[in-house]
Structures are given as structure tokens and as C-alpha cells.
Amino acid sequence: MFQPERTPAWRYAIGMFGTSIPINMIKGSMILYYVDILGLDVRAYGVVMVIYAVIDAIDNPLLGHLSDHTRSRFGRRRPWLVVGAPLLAASMIAFFSAPESLDGMGLVLWFAVFAILCEAFDSMLNANYGALLPELYPRERDRAVANSLRQGFQLVALVISLAVTPLLTTQIFGSENSTEGFRTTAVVYAVIAVVVIVFMALSARENPRYSTRERLLPSVWSIVRNPLFWKVGLTGACYGMAMALVLAGLQLYVRYSLGLPVSNALYLQGIVILLSAGGLAIWTRVVARRGALWTWRISFVVLAAGFAALFFATGLVSAIAAGALLGAGWSGMLATNDLIVARVLDADAARNGTHREGLFLSAFGFFGRLNGIVTGLALTSLGVFFGYNSGDDPGSDPGLAFRVYLCVYPFVLATIGALAARFISIPVEPAPAADEPGVEQPR
């Protein structure tokens, strides 16, 4: 019987570094780049975010289904990863290369086209990369270690793509009110991402028996009829939407709410991310002792408390202190959220006798698409309640506006998630099959 070779956890995990750098630069800098510097109206931004979320919700299941059905000597996931990496890189460079002559509808169309392309190719990468986790590491203990490592690599990528980016774009490669620094930074990150993703993809040892021939519509119908899909998806979306607001608005929170240069986001983001990375080892031990579900519930509570503390920060030092608590909750969510989702995938495979992780994760990606809608609507609400419409028209109190955007809205979402998580139960860990990696074969 075929026994797939185990993929080293560190080599799988490093792929998260490559997938995280591009999309987090995009999400962390798009408002600053398009709204505050180029003058895109927040109402146009909100409309585009809703449209792209709808398109992405449609193309995600299709991409996942195509991945599950791919049959090649390179496996199901690797071809998509190798092709998707340069496509995302090229789209990101174009996203941050808007011609300075563009304004009005021309600027809106440029933003919309490349925002949608970036999100589509990011979805292609993450559906395939995420599908490898339950396949390569079927036992929860091994899975928790691999997940902890990849989240650690993600946090390193976040230090670079979020914390270091403002320094690169506004000081080293450009200035506070120019765009050339964004284009240069995007090129550097694109090269790094492609090299890392391809390096990871070439090492993945997929199990050929996991290939499926299920038709798309019956598979999708089976997934949407699964109550656990909705419970876990919507609860996890509360965490995802809260962090999406943070990623999108932190630089402007630093500028307006703390009254500091955008480059100071380096210190706030960097320290919070580093503390979160250190907390992964602690949370992974808690998972081993108390289980993923219990740890997931506690992490939601800590995350909500961190947002509450951040609202009252008045300077960089107090913001960092509040951010430490936020980072602890974030670290716990990183250590557990994908484990909860993977357990749902395990149960689906056991019940239906087929491994369709690509389609299932893409379906879960529907909830991730809510991030774009929420960030768009939240930003639009700042114009309604506080008069912030763009960098050219910031209203009378942009500091309070971004304090609400970055703290109040995420606090409400995290609190809803914490309450919902208390009522969710997940299937017990399944016994690994005899031909899965790490399982000794009978002699």
C-alpha cells in the first residue's frame, strides 16, 4: 500500500510567509494609498469592496473544486500554487502602480480591477495551501505543531508586510504623501513571495488516494446543508472581520487617533506581532492540554479585551501596552482557528468518504469575503457619522473616527464571536488511516 513521505513541518510552514506578505501589504496599505493619498472617495471604496466580495464568493468554490479535481503527476495542489504565485505578484505590483494622472472613475476602475484580481489569486493560493494542512498532518498533535510553525512564519511576514512597510513606503523608498515608495516595496515583496511559495510547493508530498471526482453542485449543496459549516464559519468570520479592520485601519489610527507619523506604525505593529509570535508556543501547549475548542473560546475573550483596552490608548506607549493584550488574543486565535476548521474537514471526509478540502476551504472562504464588505461599510460609516470622506476631506474629528473603526467595531465582532463559540461543539479527532504519513504499517 502507498505510504506518502512526510513533508517536513518547517518546509510546509514557510509557505505561509510567502502567501502572507503580498495580501497583507495590500490590505494594510490600500486605504492609505488609494483613499488618503490618491483621494479615492470612501463611498466608491465601499461599493468596490462589496462588488469584489460578491465576485470572490462566487469564484472561490469554483477554484476549490478545480483543485480537488486536478489530476497531474505533480499532485492536486502544487500546480495551482506554482501558477498562482506569479499571478498574485504581478497583480500586486499593478495595484500599487496606479498612474498619477488617474482620478474620478478612472481611479475607481483601476482600484476595482486590481483589487479583485489580487483577491482572486490570493484565494487560489490559500485554498490550495490550506488544503494541504489536514492532508499532510492527519493527527491533531502533528497538525497543531505544523499550524503553530506556519502561523509563526505568518507573523514574521506581518512584521515585514505591515510593520516595516510604512517605513519603506513613506521614508526609505518614498515619502508621507507620495506613491513611488509603494510601487518599489510591492516589487520587492512580490519577488520574495514567489520564491518562497514555489520552494514550499515543490516539497509537498500529496496523497494520491485523496483525489476526488465529485460534481460541483452536489458537493456545494452537501456543504451548505452542514450546520457545522455555518456555525464555525460565521463564528470564525467574527474574528476574521475584526482583524481585517485592524489591518486596514491601523496606519490611519496611528496618524489620526494617536497623532503620530504613519512610520510609527512600525513600532506598534512590530511589538504586537512579535509578542503574538512568542505566544504561539504557549497557546500550542494549551491546545495539547485542554484541546483546540476550549482554547479557541478563551482566545476570543482575550481578543475582545484587547480591543477594549486599545480604545483608551492616548499615545504610542499606552497603545503598545493595550496591543500586548490584543496580541495575546490574536495569537490564541492563530493557534486554534485553523484547527477547528480542519476538524470540520475531517468530519466531512469521514462522513462522505471523499477528501474535498479545496472546495470546503473555498466555501469557508465565503465568510472571509465578508471582510471586504465589512471594512468597506465600516469605512463608509466614518463619512456618515464623523465626516471622514478621504484624506482631502477628513472631517472635524478623524481621530475619533478611526478609534471607532479600529477598536469599537472589532470589539463588537469579537464579543459576538466569543458568545457564539460557547455554543459550538466539534467532532472528536478521527483515528488516522493506516496509509497516512507517520502511521506505522503492519509488518
Image (spheres, grey):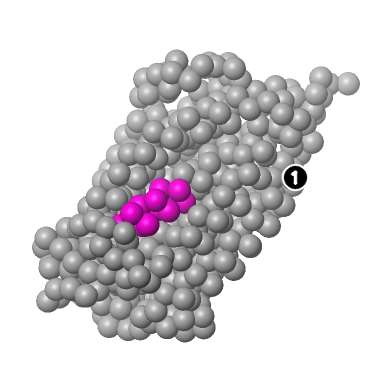
- Label 1 is placed on what type of residue? Ser
Q: Position of residue 278 (x, y in %)?
A: 55, 64
Q: Is residue 83 visible?
A: yes
* Most foreground residue, 7 or 301: 7
Q: Is residue 9 above or below residue 39?
A: above
**Magenta segment range?**
108-118
Q: Is residue 215 above or below residue 230?
A: above
In the rendered image, the quadrant that contains the N terminus is top right
Q: Position of residue 363 (x, y in %)?
A: 43, 32
Q: Would residue 43 be found to the left or right of residue 55 on screen?
A: left
Q: Position of residue 260 (x, y in %)?
A: 32, 84
How packed is label 1: few (under 14 Cα within 10 Å), some, or many (20 or more)?
some
Question: For the view shown, which residue lies furthest in the front direction?
Answer: 101
Q: Is residue 150 above or below residue 215?
A: below
- Within the magenta stretch, is there residue 113? yes
Q: Would residue 319 be found to the left or right of residue 165 on screen?
A: left
Q: Is residue 325 above or below residue 74?
A: below
* Most foreground residue, 15 or 239: 15
Q: Which residue is mark 1?
A: 203
Residue at screen point 59% across, 42% down: 129
Residue at screen point 25% across, 62% down: 104
Q: Would residue 363 be found to the left or right of residue 400 on screen?
A: right
